[in-house]
Image (cartoon, rainbow, N blue to C red):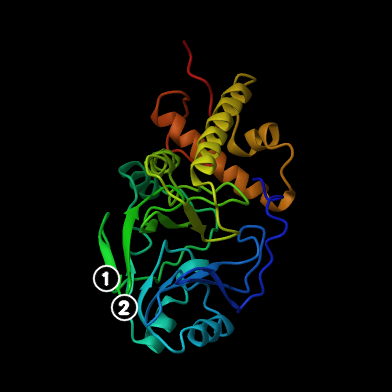
Amino acid sequence: MQSDLQPDFDPVPGDAEPLAPGVRRILAPNPSPMTFRGTNTYLLGWRELAVIDPGPDDPAHLRAILRAAEGGRITAILISHAHLDHSALARPLAERAGAPVYAFSDALGGRSARMQNLAASGLARGGEGVDLAFRPDIALGDNDSVTGDGWCLTALHTPGHFGNHLCFAWGDTLFCGDLVMGWASSLVSPPDGDLTDFMASCRRLRAAPWSVFYPGHGAPIGRPAERLDWLIAHRLSREAALLDALSQGAATCTELAARVYTDTPPALIHAATRNILAHMIDLHGRNMVSAELPLSAETRFRLPRN
């Protein structure tokens, strides 16, 4: 999953680091193989502040956000998606700041019909830390805006990593959550993740002339178009590798992971297997693989018989 990139990105958790005029980042103290150094919380504005992705429910991180907001007033709390490392602190922060929480929906919103059907059939999550208790105060639809003194953020519904995922555009700057990261490819784990939607969201972003992406984990992405091209090509190359692996015979996602992800560290092999499941569901929907229903990580997938 390319986790060897950005070795020099190592900010101090709790420090409010200026990134651009009006933009600061506070790193949450939750490093892991899936979160890299931790979750990036962003503060936008001067007198009226937007907080983007307050992060995990951690008292020290809450204090760091409130400390950084001194001299101004938090007027909006925006959530990219309902994973615990992004949304769990939203309600404690809202209670302390007296600001509303904005998001696309609760944790189950934004799913494609296919993922809704798979979830109803019993497809299990992969343990990604879904914040099932999360509820926004105000729901944001695609292209809805939130404004404050000196800033205006436009929500873009960009499902793929998660059904209710939003990116937030500020001019040609994009706070891109976990859809695009520079240190790793994004996890896509059904039924909350959807590879078909992920590719569509990446292609949607690729059509606009962004100057910089501020991701949910890792350093800013200074060449967004190049990174999006890499992500799209990476997924297409994985698809080709998986189809080639299936030419050796039918296999489950775990068996395919052993065939394809030969250089993946053990700590990331579970995530790799979930990504393979996302590919298999996408390929099945395009009639490029066959399998007995219902689909799951234990299903044996095969190439269609001619």
For the residue pair 127 and 239, the one nearer the viewer reads as 239
Find residue 213 and name its label: none
Q: In this view, does 150 lie above or below 191?
A: below
- Location of mark 1 (residue): 138
The secondary structure type at the circle numbered 2 is loop
- The quarter of the rendered structure image containing the N terminus is top right
Q: Residue at x 45, y 40 (%)?
A: 195
Q: In this view, does 158 lie to the left or right of 8?
A: left
Task: Tell me whether circle 1 and circle 2 mark residues in contact (CB < 8 Å).
Answer: yes
In three-dimensional space, the C-alpha distance between marks 1 and 2, rounded to whole angstroms, equals: 7 Å
* Nearer to me, 35 or 271: 35
- What residue is drawn where x is 53% and y is 87%? 63
Q: Residue at x 63, y 74 (%)?
A: 29
Residue lying furthest top: 306
In the rendered image, the vertical position of residue 58 relative to residue 171, given as above or below:
below
Labels in figure, total: 2
Residue 13 percent across, percent down from the top left: 64, 75
Sequence order check, earlier mark of 1 and 2: 2
**Where is residue 207, by image quadrant?**
top left
Q: Mark 2 points at which residue?
A: 100
Q: Where is residue 24 in the image (x, y as percent from the top left)?
A: 51, 72
- Asked which secondary structure carries label 1, the reply is strand
Amino acid at circle 1: Ile
- Amino acid type at mark 2: Pro
- Residue 182 shows in the view: yes
User: Which sits in the foreground, 240 or 214?
Assistant: 214
